[in-house]
Image (cartoon, rainbow, N blue to C red):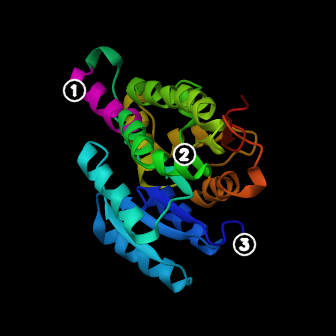
Amino acid sequence: MLLDGSVAVVTGAGTGIGREIALRMAAEGADMVLTGRSEGPMKEVAELVRGAGRRALIAPMDLRDAASIEAAAQAAQAEFGRVDVLVNNSGVGGPSKPLWELEAEEWEDTFRVNVTGTFLVCKAFLPGMIARRSGSVVVIGSVTGKRPLVNRTPYAASKTALIGMVRTLAWEVGTSGIRVNLVSPGGVEGERLGWVFEQQAAARGITVEEARADFAGGSPLQRLVSPRDVADTTVFLASSRAASITGEDVNVSAGLAMY
């Protein structure tokens, strides 16, 4: 198994991509620290992890609350004594409107979660990895950090910021034996993307089905991405099979982005 005996933290582990990543990591032998704001869904994931024969700790966390992040890091240390893998998956989609119609609070809230939240999680969990001189950090970004998505400037700008964070952090922790990589999914099947299609359809005066088809048609494979696709790539980057990969931005987008 790719992660046999490892301890992995996944933010936003209760639903969507985070849920799939947590379950895939458990299937590959990792004990899991499940973090997020909604304990109900995380309890379900924890039961599935334990059913796979791995340990699971639920550590409530709000990326807007630095104290809750520190508390989660301390809980993980107390339960497992270390963290080998950190997956920064949590994020928000932000508002859907032209930039000039945005309120400053809407812009700042998107960055507070997607960028500052990622910074705070790394800040809380990296010292232990540095002390042990080993570890892998994977940040879930988006191809929207590299290509336009109309009426989503806060989201796009926040995801572009993660690229710079990952590349620089990879240099800062590389001599401590820690790797840092970014996964940039394309359109991932799920409730959040459904909401995006609704907003895009309303803004462009087309149907939701047309917005979906238009988005999927922009990729060579003519389809959206499944959460499993993202999880498989994340597991690989977290594992020793990616031992010489760091500072990279890996697209999982059905070819929607190729750079």
Q: CA distance from mark 1 to mark 3?
A: 45 Å
**Circle 3: element type:** loop
Q: CA distance from mark 1 to mark 2?
A: 35 Å
Residue 51 at x, y percent in the picture: 51, 85
The image quadrant where one finds the C terminus is: top right
Say left or right for 133 vs 126.
right
Kind of residue at disc 2: Ile
Disc ID at residue 130 = 2
1 vs 3, front mark: 3
**Circle 2: element type:** helix
**Circle 1: element type:** helix
Height in image: 245 above or below 70? Answer: above
User: Can you see residue 103?
Assistant: no
Residue that label 1 marks: 105
1 vs 2, front mark: 2
Say left or right for 21 vs 196.
right
Residue at 66% in and 48% down:
223
Residue that label 3 marks: 1
Height in image: 92 above or below 116? Answer: below
| Marks 1 and 2, the one that precedes in the sequence | 1
Residue at 68% in and 33% down:
257
Q: Does the segment drawn in magenta span residue 108? A: yes
Residue 100 at x, y percent in the picture: 30, 14
Residue 114 at x, y percent in the picture: 40, 37
In this orientation, which residue lies closer to the viewer: 227 or 23? 23
Kind of residue at disc 1: Glu
